[in-house]
Image (cartoon, rainbow, N blue to C red):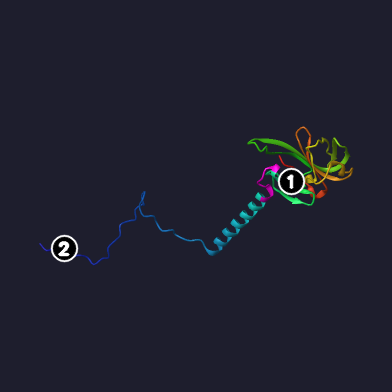
């Protein structure tokens, strides 16, 4: 018998099999375009910058290490002429409640109000917001006034203030002046 003639056809490749565990992996089909890479880099830089500003504004030290009126790890805040100032939505807040870390692994509720002083004494301050909301707050030796740079007797009737208080309306901080909107004291 004569052997069958071989065909001159090119060899056909076997169909590609799925790469199993440890098997060769397929080559990536495409790389990002230069435009997509530039956009991703710009977004990453923006996120890093915003994160850095927030971390800087929130501070990393304990309130005692930061001195009177320290940020105590709160934010987003920046330092203004009268002490810490809120940025973002809190900047325009007239009054409200918010939850913050208590510095001991738990949380606590605090209140804030921005308005005009209608009465002030060594033991209390009354503020009235633009929408008519009025609240009396107690003051004691622990109340921080203008980031610790002032005393309560420097706050006058008619002044614009931002007060941060606990839920019993004990003033934790009073920032005298419109520049301190949303200012808060350390834990």
Residue range (magenta): 56-64
**147 and 176: which is toward the camera:** 147
Residue at which label 2 appears: 4
The residues tagged by marks 2 and 1 sit, at their Cα atoms, a distance apart of 88 Å
Residue under the point 82% across and 49% down? 178
Instruction: Give whichever of discs 2 and 1 has the lower sequence position.
Output: 2
Q: Give the secondary structure at mark 2.
A: loop
Q: Is residue 10 rendered magenta in the image?
A: no
- Dividing the picture into quadrants, the one containing residue 139 is top right
Nearer to us: label 2 or label 1 = 1
Q: Is residue 61 rendered magenta in the image?
A: yes
Q: Is residue 163 among the parts visible in the rendering?
A: no
- What label does residue 90 carry, if any? 1
Crowd rating for badge 2 (residues with CA inside 10 Å; few <14, some 14–19, many 20+): few
Q: Is residue 109 among the parts visible in the rendering?
A: yes
Relative to 77, is 14 on the left or the right? left
Q: Give the secondary structure at mark 1.
A: helix
Indicate the position of residue 135 as horizontal and vertical percent values. Answer: 83, 36
Reply above or below: 7 against 88: below
- Dividing the picture into quadrants, the one containing residue 35 is bottom right
Reply above or below: 23 against 120: below
Farthest-out residue, left:
1
Indicate the position of residue 133 as horizontal and vertical percent values. Answer: 83, 38
Residue under the point 73% across and 37% down? 110
- Dividing the picture into quadrants, the one containing residue 12 is bottom left
Quadrant, the C terminus: top right
């Amino acid at each position: 018998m004569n052997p069958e003639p071989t065909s001159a056809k090119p060899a056909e490749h076997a169909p590609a099999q799925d790469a199993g565990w440890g098997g060769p992996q397929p080559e990536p089909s495409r790389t990002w375009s230069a435009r997509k890479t530039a956009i991703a880099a710009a977004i990453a830089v923006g996120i890093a910058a915003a994160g850095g500003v927030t971390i800087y504004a929130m501070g990393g030290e304990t309130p005692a290490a930061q001195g009177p009126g320290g940020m105590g790890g709160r934010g987003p805040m920046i330092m203004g002429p009268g002490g810490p100032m809120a940025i973002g939505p809190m900047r325009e807040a007239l009054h409200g409640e918010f939850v913050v870390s208590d510095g001991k692994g738990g949380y606590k509720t605090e209140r804030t109000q921005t308005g005009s002083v209608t009465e002030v004494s060594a033991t209390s301050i009354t503020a009235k917001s633009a929408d008519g909301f009025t609240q009396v707050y107690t003051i004691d030796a622990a109340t921080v006034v203008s980031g610790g740079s002032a005393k309560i007797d420097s706050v006058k009737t008619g002044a614009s203030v931002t007060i941060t208080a606990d839920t019993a309306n004990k003033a934790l901080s009073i920032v005298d002046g419109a520049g301190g909107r949303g200012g808060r004291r350390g834990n």
